[in-house]
Image (cartoon, helix red, strand yellow):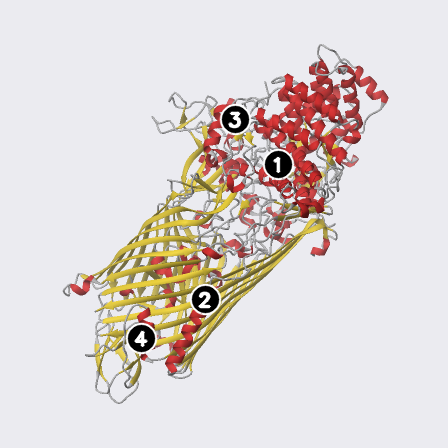
Amino acid sequence: MKKVVLSLLMLLGFVGFAAAQQKLTGKIINAQGEPMVGASVLVKGTATGTVTDVDGNFAISAPKGATLVVSFVGAQTQEVTVGSESVINVTLADSGLLEEVVVTQLGISRAKKSLGYTAQDLKADQLTLARDANVANALAGKIAGVQVLGQSGAKFGTPNIRVRGVNTLTGGDPLYVVDGTPTDISQVNVDDVESLTVLKGPAATALYGNRASSGVVIITTKRAGKNESKFEINQSTTFDQVSLLPKLQNEYGGGYSQDWETFTYNAAVHPASWASFNGQKILDYSADESWGPKIDGSLHRSAFSWQPGAEFGQLTPFSANPNNVRDFYNKPLSTNTNISFSKGTESFQTRISYTHIGTNGIVPNSSQGRDFISAKNTLHMTKNFTANLNINYTNTRTKNRPADQYGSSGGTSSTGAYGVGNAILFGYNQTAGSFNQWFQRQLRIEDLRDYKNADGTFRSWNIGGPTDAKPKYWDSPYTQVYENTNNLRSERMFGDFGLAYSFTDYLKLSGTVRLDLDNSNGEGRIAAGTLNEGGKGGFANYSGSAKEMNYEAMLNFNKTFDKLSVTANAGTNLRKNELRAYFQSTVGGLTTPGFYNIGASKDRPNVVNRLFERQVSSVFGNVSLGYNNFFYVEGSVRNDWSSTLPKENNSYFYPSVSTSIVVSELLPQNNILTYAKVRGGFAKVGTDVDPYQIYPIYNIGNPYGSNPVQTMPSRLLNQNLKPGLSQSIEAGIDLKFLKNKIGVEFTYYKNDNKDQIIPIPTAPGSGYTSALINAGNIQTKGLELHLNFNPVKTKTLDWNMDFNFDRSNSKVVQLAEGLTNYQLGSTWRGLTINAREGEEWGLFVGRKIQIDPASGKRIVGADGHYVYDLNQNLGSVLPKFKGGFVNSLNWKDIVFRFNIDFIVGGKFFSVTRMFNAYAGLAEETAGVNELGKPKRDPVANGGGILLDGVTADGKQNTTRVETQEFYEDRMFALHDYWIYDQTFVKLREVSLGYNVPKKLLGNGKGLKNAYIGLLVRNPLLLYSAIGGGIDISEAELYWTEGGQLPPVRSIGLNLRLGF
Amino acid sequence: MKIFNKSMFALLVAASMTTACNDFGDINISPNSPAQPSTSSLLTGALTNVGGVATAMVPCLYTQQFGDVTYIEESRYKTVNFDYAGFYTGPLNSLQTIIQLNTDAITKDAAASAGSNANQIATARILKAYFYLNMTDRWGDIPYSAALKGNENFTPAFDKQQDIYTDLFKELKEAQAQFDGGKTVSGDILLSGNTARWKKFANTLRAIMALRLSKVDATKGKAEFVAALADGAFTSNADNVQFKYLADANYEHPLYNNYITTNRKDFAVSDVMVNLLVKLNDPRLAAFADKATGTNTYRGVPYAVFPVTWKAQDVSLAATSMRAQNSAANVLTYAQLLFAQAEAAKLGWTSGNAKTLYEDAIKASMQQWGVYTDAAYASYIAQVDVVYSDAKALELIGTQRWIALFYQGYESWAEWRRTNYPALTPAAKPLNTSGKIPRRMAYPTSEPTLNKTNYDAVVARQGADVQETKVWWDK
């Protein structure tokens, strides 16, 4: 019997033996009563030993009278003699050196010193600093090498996260694993999170397979402890408001020209009753720009004075409304309430948690309600046999998600993984997309609020003219939020059911079935009579289901032989993904206005249904050997078989190896260098491709009448694809000084992402614009520094500062043969973002203003305008340097914390700034020039602007240009001018709270702890290079935005009670 | 034994999963797209692209038939590079596939269910020639003989326009003779599989093409012109080829979309066109333009004037009658052929009577636009600015052809480039550097990076990749 086990273990590359003796169990806790994870328990003088599990429990066999040596780095080693008892609980005293334990791959808790790679982690209190409901947002600035690409809170979205720069040609998000189950970060309830670990390099991610090539975020949720009984309430209420708006001018109103127009009565087209209007001042209502007349208070006919209602025929003063945009946005209250129940005995532990988050949007009539329910159950059926059931359920209801892309009529809506949707669903940006880009500055928000006539027709500020009340480019923003609505719902369930059997104290077999299931649906409406869908109304709906199943079996070996500790795992995994998406939208309008149904589609509705399936089978194993608590080496292997690759190439193998040496173990005890470790690793990770990228297909189109339509695909698929393979090296050093007062973690890494499966662009003459091949090498190199200072730690004062810095560079070393540039995206008039051979990834190429080499100044032509060249290098989108700072101060019972993050360098193209100026809305388009004359006055009268530049002969420019022509005509799509450094410093979160002293809580039988605090999210953008009221940390895309929704600031109260 | 059994079980589970690992059955066959082509559906798909060519607005702006209303851009020559990828990946690759499926021994029998192999091939060849002609007239030298080869050639070389013309003459000549009277082609939404009409379309197109060579190779032009007529071209407006838009938002007329569906009204008939038609008292004015809604008068939009001082309601939009949701767009007309014949006669290529052909062309155009009356026509052709004069024949033909080609932008632009008639004044505040009306469109910006060697070669041969470089036949 043992031989079989032994040969199995030998297969994994090590030898072990076992001795059957008296069985002992126990729990190791620290001075604070918390379980110590990964503490070593050794039978003195033998090779028998074990390590405690996540709950601090251990099981070991030892003869009566033997001595157990219980040790843990950072704690004083203790020896216990085995008597007749079968349970031994030990409390280890703090040695002043904290042993750090992190949860790493496969959900295994490991002593940090044994790891040959970085695994930076965050505990619950660091994540919930200001109770951001989104785990991804809460990461900003807290982990070195992690960049949070945030989005405005106004749209209830989830940010993207980039770990260690860009690891694939098109960039990718990390894999999120919650208690071993891969799922989506947005589905994680922050209040349930115990800890979060980011595994950055492939050395750490090798065991997660092909989805881990952009890193892994491992989340461990809270569970009940043995003999624990706890009831907790955590409630916060916040007051939300716009935190930043673009700077707008208030001197000129709507129009394309400063000259007032007057109404000319024409009996041929106007009713006779309008004769008296002849000669009245009118605006160009069809203009959605503000190059119009000076706001001088003169009596004029507003757009609404031509529409039915009290204002019809009235003259009103043409006056400024500086707060019209700000007044549009609401200042709602939002709540976040969690209750949790934990109960545990020796034989079962259960934690049940419920959270309700009610977020009211700053955009009127928008809101999101979320409910999270989770249950974590462990049953110890016998001493050796454990059953686990973990269930998480999330229900999300979003009402009227605002769009933040460009345009009143051009956006699209994304349904995430389902990849379906069109503008009807929620793509029209008629709020921020109007205010900051296409608007008339003088409008009164009260006039806009009155968006509907008594007869059901709609009112707009942007009409064709006195006789044409149809909206030209824009509805009232209120029409958008109250009539063109959307309703999105999703239900998600994820969790696992697992059984584990311990054959001995060192050998465990477990089998787990993991499920992640999403069901989403949504609908969008466009009211008949509004701007879009030809004014005929529209309706779209979708539903989707995405299911991932993982069937996992794992054999786990964990034993210490004298000075040698061995941890080994061997396992197999079968993953099945199935995604179904259904989408329908009306075409040509609704046959029955107000009846929102696909059956009301005037023309053949647009229908999409899709199914994607994928299977990946895997076997894997890893072994970690530790010698004498100071030398560790670890190796892993994995082989995947993916259904998406051609059969002959669908198997791929990848290994990793890493080592760490705790150098300080060799040094004499001293008071300066407390701890020192060097580490290094090498790893490979294989990747497959999306489903259906192998065999040729044809596309079907909308039938022309009764004739079916087929077209050729523009991408040539490939039956000879191979798996992609990235490899990386990583090395680092961890130091602690002055008894942990100063901690330093420094890491260098280099990833080579080779042979990626990418659709390389091909010359269109080939009949295809892209072809799928294996190609490329993106090389990412970087440095990461994590610093921790704990300058003061006394009974009353504990001050902790955590700094993260990182520098990363992602260079396109090679694309494909004959290919030197891969276009990642493009926007206005040929601005492209590219992966270009030999350059940094994310290179902007577009129109660049010429620079005079002598003076370094921009060159202007004889007409006084900038001179530019086409297709010039405009810099990379990737930041040069970034980081964050978390400050935490505990003084007696008061807790004060804040979090700052920053980015230096990297470029960004702002469409909002471009059109804000183009349309004469921006502050910079008005005011006076250096002569003290209004900029908008004609150059001939001393107006206009003088560009700071030199002419081709190097002389300082003296030719003034007309302001309107400059911004509206010349600067449009002069990309260089609207590309900014991303550099910003942002105060993200602040919290100030009071832990009610235990003595005030009574006898401790009821209320055990209580906390009350103030919190602020998004308090202040301390510095931003882009300026102009744009917050680049919350952009819709990593390189550009089309119509930015404003960032949201939340100020509130937080109350936590524990019973 | 217990442990043994369980360990073995675990190993067996692992082993069974491993052996099953690399066989996933048909899971990777897409259920979302057809794996099999249908030649009739591919033909319909290719034909839906004809409308886009026929109704393109940019060349209408270049030749000043239309003007921009609010955003004064293409009328000031803003865009330099135009993309042709949609032609190659769209209709051309589809038509190439149709030809291939009707040629390959393995597929041709199955393909014949959608029409005889010969009929399908002939139809596809004519249509391919139509698209390629439009492309070479726009960009000059383009990938042709090395194009549409998929992974055999991802960097196709550019053929000289002269060689492309030579081959297109051959293709059109062969294709129109290839119809075999077999099963009618299905999926033909342009000419309903009517082979007689396809032949006339091919031969008329060949005649128009031949006249393009009037300045660069008159000898070949004349020979091809005469041969094309001999093979049988249009004989009346009934032969006109039109692309029919549908009362379906998926296939609605582009001006209906711009004016009604999106309410943008970005383009209006230019003052250059309106003023001329008013001056000539041209009955086609009402067929081309509406009165401005704000004033109830005809007013062409001031051409390429910036900044704007008018609104859509102040200017004449294209006539309601020509831009209903399901209006048809002109692809190739009898009037075009008559103008070509008039010019050919004037050039001495044929023995026809230039004056008669010129007047017939005007008459055909008026009939085509539905505004013909004997009286109006008689007084129209008698007026001093219209009446035929041998001395000014080319200018008269050029100006009248420009009117007749209203909203047939690419034809109008090609004829203007070839003849320089009518005399057009370039935009006052151009956005291009030369300030001249474009003579070609620049290649898509992807070519210099994706096809550099061939791109460099074509630029060296043809001239700079700019709007001002003239294509081969433009002298």
Q: Quadrant of the C terminus of chain B?
A: top right
Residue that label 4 marks: A6
- Which-is-in-front pick, marks 2 and 3? 2
- Residue type of the residue flagged with mark 3: Val
Residue that label 2 marks: B19
Q: Chain of mark 1?
A: A
Specify whether A253 is left or right of A838: right
Above or below, A463 relative to A354? above
Residue that label 3 marks: B466
- CA separation, marks 4 and 2? 24 Å
- Pick the residue in front: A106 or B255: A106
- Pick the residue in front: A675 or A580: A580
Q: Quick one: SS at disc 1?
A: loop
Specify whether B269 is left or right of A498: right
Residue that label 1 marks: A287
Q: Quadrant of the N terminus of chain B?
A: bottom left
Where does residue A270 sit, x and y in percent of width and height? Answer: 76, 34
- Which-is-in-front pick, marks 4 and 2? 2
